[in-house]
């Protein structure tokens, strides 16, 4: 193998695939990036056996071939290279990397040991704007459970029905859901559970892309086809992930329907108060909210025997009477930060029932938060 590639594109490709490579004592090949050159492009591949990713870059191919090198080393080297172009030349069992000023020789890994990244059948296909998908995943992925005791809620739920994509995640204490309109209706409804790690990978890849992403897959795997940048300096990215087996719980049943108490406050001011209260809360990050309907204010309190006490209030539009409830301040802060718009609405039933949190400016996103029950 011998190629010449733009340094900028080499670094971008390695940055994307390098996050998938993992340190593995039992399978050291997973620490590597495969570089594969064919007729007119070079492909960079990495996998952790759950997520596989391939980035294709236009390059000058002097000799086709493939090689696997440690991701950590090529990533660090790439940031230190100089000049516009880089050459990679496989000489026996050594990859020689040259730029305008430096020459580095790397020992290679056995490319025959590199796992094949499987390709799913295209049982369905939709297209969606990259930045829209990235933002939606960012709004829900932190709610996915980190426990493997219930693997079906350790991922992000995807539902494609009609002309809408629904994305949701829950850890049983909180739930986030985002609806995204699609440009075309699908013929058949699909439900899938995407591993949270794969969702985080995808966010990192497409966060600044306004290009359309093509999503295809079958019952076991899902593939995201992404084009980044403009030709001839574009990157074509394919990310394949296995899907989590099982049935996602009917979380829709826990979304409160028309709770009797409604509280509307300024979102930015509320975020500041909740963050301040969380600093003075105990180990459960308990922040207590109570309505003061006659004064038109929402009271915010937190107390810790080790740190101190916080008390404050903000102007609020309150309908439905008085209520006092405690929440995990960090979870509540996450909800507010993931929303857009100037105001936020908390819909409550009582101190023991889940709260529905929405923004007046974006009805496509909702957050459900269970209260901290008093002993």
Image (cartoon, rainbow, N blue to C red):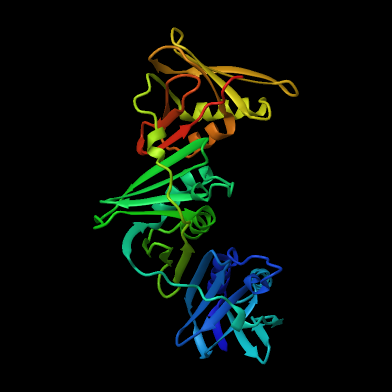
Residue 339 vs 247, above or below: the answer is above
- Residue 121 at x, y percent in the picture: 37, 70
User: Residue at point 32% right, 63% down?
Assistant: 125
User: Residue at point 47% right, 72% down?
Assistant: 118
In the foreground, 8 or 223: 223
Is 173 on the left or on the right of 343, as rendered?
Answer: right
Q: Is residue 132 visible?
A: yes
Q: Looking at this rendering, what residue extends furthest in the top direction?
A: 294
Q: Is residue 104 visible?
A: no
Residue 92: name its quadrant. Answer: bottom right
In the foreground, 334 or 234: 334
- Residue 277 at x, y percent in the picture: 62, 25
User: Residue at point 44% right, 37% down?
Assistant: 339
- Residue 181 at x, y percent in the picture: 30, 49
- Residue 284 at x, y percent in the picture: 64, 29
Q: Looking at this rendering, what residue extends furthest in the right direction?
A: 306
Residue 241 vs 260, above or below: the answer is below
Residue 34: name its quadrant. Answer: bottom right
Badge count:
0
Considering the image in quadrants, where does the N terminus appear? bottom right
Residue 140 vs 242, above or below: the answer is above
Residue 327 vs 12, above or below: the answer is above
User: Residue at point 66% right, 85% down?
Assistant: 95
Residue 49: name its quadrant. Answer: bottom right
Considering the image in quadrants, where does the C terminus appear? top right
Is 280 on the left or on the right of 5, as rendered?
Answer: right
């Amino acid at each position: 193998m011998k190629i010449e590639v733009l340094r900028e594109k080499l670094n971008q490709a390695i940055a994307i695939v390098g996050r998938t490579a993992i340190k593995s004592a039992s399978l050291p090949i997973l620490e590597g990036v495969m570089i594969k050159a064919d007729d007119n492009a070079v492909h960079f591949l990495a996998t952790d056996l759950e997520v596989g990713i391939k980035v294709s870059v236009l390059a000058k191919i002097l000799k086709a071939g493939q090689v696997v090198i440690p991701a950590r080393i090529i990533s660090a080297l790439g940031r230190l290279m100089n000049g516009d172009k880089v050459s990679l030349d496989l000489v026996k069992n050594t990859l020689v990397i040259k730029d305008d000023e430096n020459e580095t020789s790397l020992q290679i890994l056995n490319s025959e040991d590199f796992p094949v990244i499987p390709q799913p059948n295209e049982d369905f296909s939709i297209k969606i704007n990259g930045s829209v998908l990235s933002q939606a995943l960012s709004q829900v992925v932190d709610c996915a459970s980190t426990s493997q005791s219930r693997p079906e809620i350790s991922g992000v739920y995807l539902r494609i029905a009609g002309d809408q994509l629904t994305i949701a995640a829950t850890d049983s204490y909180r739930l986030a859901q985002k609806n995204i309109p699609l440009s075309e209706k699908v013929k058949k409804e699909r439900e899938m559970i995407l591993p949270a790690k794969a969702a985080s990978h995808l966010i990192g890849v497409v966060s600044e892309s306004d290009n359309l992403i093509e999503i295809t897959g079958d019952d076991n795997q899902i593939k995201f086809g992404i084009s980044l940048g403009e030709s001839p300096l574009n990157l074509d990215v394919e990310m394949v992930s296995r899907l989590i087996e099982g049935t996602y719980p009917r979380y829709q049943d826990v979304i409160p329907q028309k709770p009797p108490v409604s509280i509307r406050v300024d979102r930015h001011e509320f975020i500041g108060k909740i963050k301040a209260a969380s600093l003075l809360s105990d180990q459960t990050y308990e922040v207590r909210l109570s309505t003061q309907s006659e004064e038109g204010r929402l009271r915010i309190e937190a107390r810790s025997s080790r740190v101190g006490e916080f008390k404050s209030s903000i102007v609020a539009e309150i309908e439905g009477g008085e209520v006092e409830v405690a929440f995990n301040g960090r979870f509540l802060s996450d909800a507010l930060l993931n929303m857009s718009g100037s105001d936020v609405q908390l819909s409550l039933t009582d101190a023991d029932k889940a709260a529905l949190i929405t923004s007046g400016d974006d009805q496509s996103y909702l957050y459900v938060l269970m209260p901290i029950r008093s002993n």
